[in-house]
Image (cartoon, rainbow, N blue to C red):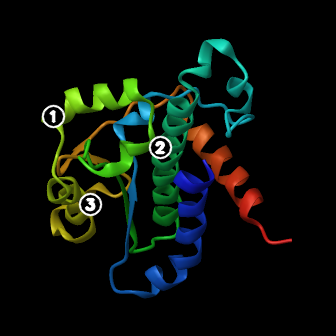
Amino acid sequence: FGVNYLAHFLLTQLLLPKLEAAEEGRVVNVSSMGHRLNLFDLEDLQCERYAESRLYGLYYKWVQYGNSKLAQILYTGELNKRLRARESKVNVYALHPGMIMTNLFQHVRIIVWIVTMLLSFLSKTVEQGAATTVFCAIHPSVKNYSGGFFKDCRVMMPTLPMGASEKAERLWDISEELVREE
């Protein structure tokens, strides 16, 4: 949660004044279709409750990953809502880059590694994986889709939990509390 979401929240908040001063600023949040693997709980953003559970023990890291990627999507929508309310020229996007063949899986258990290798024929090259990120960062056609979620250079609907708008607002408040300097 801290690295996959909260650090991005803080960096964006720190850069926002510069982005708003620019002629056209864009924020591109790399999320994942893995956002579907979530048990999103605003009272347990680190999934500490599930870390000890036998039922979720095997899936704990994947649930954490899914929660952080869902948080990115919720944050993107909430940031867009707040930017539009103040008539900002900054646009914001979230995206799924695809499963990319990198060494990311080198430290996972053998079973995950075997599944990853079996699925590798569906994977993208690093260049293919970067395409949607670059598309959202520079292509003029995405201007009308601020707040959107992209996959394969196309806007799509992410899988959002019930009450997503309210959860996004509350996540924003929690995030501000967590990054606030004492």
Amino acid type of the residue that numbered disc 2 sits on in the rendered structure: Lys
Which badge, 2 or 3, is on the more N-terminal residue?
2
Mark number displayed over residue 15: none
Mark 2 crowdedness (10 Å alpha carbons): few <14, some 14-19, many ≥20: many
Q: Position of residue 147 (x, y in %)?
A: 38, 53
Which badge, 1 or 3, is on the more N-terminal residue?
1
Q: Quadrant of residue 156?
A: top left
Residue occupying image coordinates x 15% and y 54%: 128
Check the picture and name the quadrant holding the C terminus: bottom right
Say left or right for 37 vs 124.
right
Residue topped by disc 1: 122
Q: Can you say whether 135 is above or below 111 in the image?
A: below
Say left or right for 121 vs 43.
left
Which badge, 1 or 2, is on the more N-terminal residue?
2
Mark number displayed over residue 133: 3
Spatial CA span between label 1 and label 3: 19 Å
Q: Quadrant of residue 9?
A: bottom right
Q: Secondary structure at mark 2?
A: helix
Mark 3 crowdedness (10 Å alpha carbons): few <14, some 14-19, many ≥20: many
Spatial CA span between label 1 and label 2: 21 Å
Residue topped by disc 2: 69
Amino acid type of the residue that numbered disc 1 sits on in the rendered structure: Leu
Residue extending farthest front: 110
Of the pair 159 and 147, the residue shown nearer to us: 159
